[in-house]
């Protein structure tokens, strides 16, 4: 009996792990170009490096002149990173995203540091073209750029603008394995940042309730996955619970890497919960 339970545990873990890996492989091309058109992906941007790159974009109901002030105050000790401050601060970055335009940071200069954390300033402003381009680079010990980060603003019409962000890397300094490790936390923070800048530029104040909902939904999907994992091991006819566990993995990948709208997040988790309740009653 003990042997059978161990077999079920490791068998289930193996299936979930395969689902996680395959799911990420499928979803990866979408998050590397989240929101971007083919033209935006192929467009050259200032400072592009020849190695791996990703391009993400969002439409903002505002002019470039209205968006620009939010971009140029980017950085730790300035306007913040417009992302999950609580997560960044758990890592000791001391980030505080601004909810207003800060006049003291509206005139950055080429070479000015853009810091990750206090006294961790490895990137420096590399391009400034007001209402068009703003970006920074990190270099190696010889000053050669190894990472390039740049925003581009492209008017759609009189009231809408495309905000495009491009990151690129020097392949000789940044091995592909390292870049893959970077891209996972990067997409989580960057998609939230694009959404925050959109809300700020459109005149909507940030709400802690929105972030709380995003966290609660993610945790709910994770907990449902844990519950069905236990039920799968405990019940002889637990294959239904294993299927829900795999579905939980897929939902977590979508929530983590594709930044779906809030209503869709709620629907996905309700679907998992409904499947769990239905399977439990049948059991």
Image: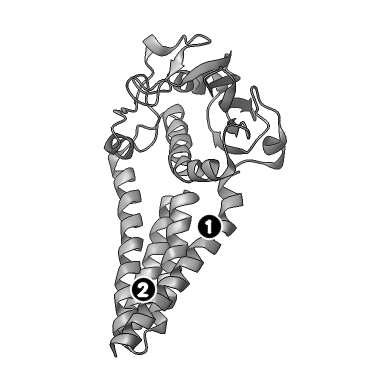
Q: Position of residue 26 (x, y in %)?
A: 59, 59
Vertical side of 106 occupied by 7: above or below: below
Question: Tag 1's secondary structure?
Answer: helix
Picture quarter with the C terminus? bottom left
Relative to residue 25, is residue 104 drawn left or right? Answer: left
Q: Where is residue 42 in the image (x, y as percent from the top left)?
A: 72, 36
Identify the residue at image location x=39%, y=26%: 116
Q: Where is residue 58 in the image (x, y as percent from the top left)?
A: 55, 37
Q: Which of marks 1 and 2 is nearer the N terminus?
A: 1
Q: Mark 2 points at which residue?
A: 274
Nearer to us in this view, 170 or 167: 170
Q: For the residue carrying disc 1, how many other residues have a C-alpha within 10 Å: few (<14), some (14-19), or many (20+)?
A: some
Q: Name the residue under label 1.
A: 24
Vertical side of 72 occupied by 252: above or below: below
Q: In which quarter of the image is residue 38?
A: top right
Q: In which quarter of the image is residue 219?
A: bottom left
| Marks 1 and 2, how far apart at CA | 25 Å
Relative to residue 251, is residue 222 drawn left or right? Answer: left
Identify the residue at image location x=51%, y=11%: 111
Identify the residue at image location x=29%, y=34%: 89
């Amino acid at each position: 009996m003990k042997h059978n339970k161990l077999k079920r545990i490791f068998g289930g873990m193996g299936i979930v792990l395969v689902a996680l890996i395959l799911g990420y492989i499928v979803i990866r091309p979408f998050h590397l170009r989240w929101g971007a058109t083919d033209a935006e992906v192929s467009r050259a941007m200032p400072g592009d490096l020849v190695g791996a790159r990703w391009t993400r974009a969002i439409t903002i109901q505002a002019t470039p002149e209205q968006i620009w002030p939010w971009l140029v105050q980017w950085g730790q000790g300035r306007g913040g990173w417009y992302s999950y401050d609580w997560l960044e601060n758990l890592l000791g970055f001391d980030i505080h995203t601004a909810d207003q335009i800060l006049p003291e940071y509206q005139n950055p200069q080429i070479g000015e540091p853009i810091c990750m954390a206090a006294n961790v300033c490895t990137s420096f402003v590399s391009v400034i073209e007001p209402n068009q381009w703003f970006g920074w680079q990190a270099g190696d010990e010889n000053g050669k750029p190894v990472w390039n980060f740049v925003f581009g603003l492209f008017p759609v019409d009189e009231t809408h603008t495309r905000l495009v962000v491009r990151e690129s890397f020097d392949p000789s300094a940044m091995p592909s394995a390292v870049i893959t490790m970077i891209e996972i936390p990067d997409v989580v923070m960057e998609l939230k940042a694009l959404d925050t800048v959109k809300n700020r530029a459109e005149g909507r104040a940030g709400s802690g309730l929105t972030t709380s909902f995003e966290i609660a939904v993610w945790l709910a999907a994770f907990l449902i996955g844990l519950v069905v994992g236990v039920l799968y091991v405990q019940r002889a006819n637990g294959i239904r619970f294993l299927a829900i566990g795999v579905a939980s993995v897929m939902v977590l990948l979508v929530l983590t890497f594709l930044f779906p709208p809030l209503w869709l997040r709620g629907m996905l988790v309700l679907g998992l919960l409904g499947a769990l309740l239905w399977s439990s009653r049948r059991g």
